[in-house]
Image: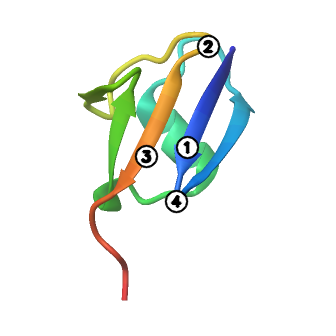
Amino acid sequence: MKVQVTYTGKTKSLTLKEGSSAQDLLEEMGINPEIVLVKQNNEIVPETELLSDKDKIDLILIKRIV
């Protein structure tokens, strides 16, 4: 399945396995789940949320690592 991901102002298309969760997406992108909120199709969701083909995902940075 393909999802559209926006993070730090950049949007890209990613291909994930069917049944992937928001956590799987974060792992694929190498993003620490403690520093972002996941927004799926304009709704904030938990990391355990399953993603679907053509979802629009916004990763909202909530904490910077120093």
Mark 3 or mark 2: whose residue is earlier in sequence: 2
Marks 1,3: beta carbons within 8 A: yes
Instruction: Name which residue type carries label 4.
Output: Thr
For the residues labelled 3 and 2, the Cα–Cα distance comes to: 16 Å
Residue 54 disc label:
2
Mark 1 or mark 2: whose residue is earlier in sequence: 1
Q: Quadrant of residue 3?
A: top right
Instruction: Name which residue type carries label 3.
Output: Leu
Residue named by callout 4: 8
**Between 47 and 45, the one nearer to me in the picture:** 45
Tell me: residue 41, above or below residue 59. Answer: above
Residue named by callout 1: 6
Residue 34's spot in the image, x, y percent?
A: 29, 59
Q: Indicate the secondary structure of the residue bearing disc 1.
A: strand
For the residues labelled 1 and 2, the Cα–Cα distance comes to: 13 Å
Instruction: Name which residue type carries label 1.
Output: Thr
Residue 6's spot in the image, x, y percent?
A: 55, 43
Tell me: residue 15, above or below residue 58. Answer: above
Residue 48's spot in the image, x, y percent?
A: 32, 27
Q: Quadrant of residue 63?
A: bottom left
Horizontal side of 31 relative to 54 (left or right) equals left
Residue named by callout 3: 59
Residue at image point 61% right, 13% down:
54
Instruction: Name which residue type carries label 2.
Output: Lys
Horizontal side of 27 relative to 3 (left or right) equals left
Residue positioned most to the front: 9
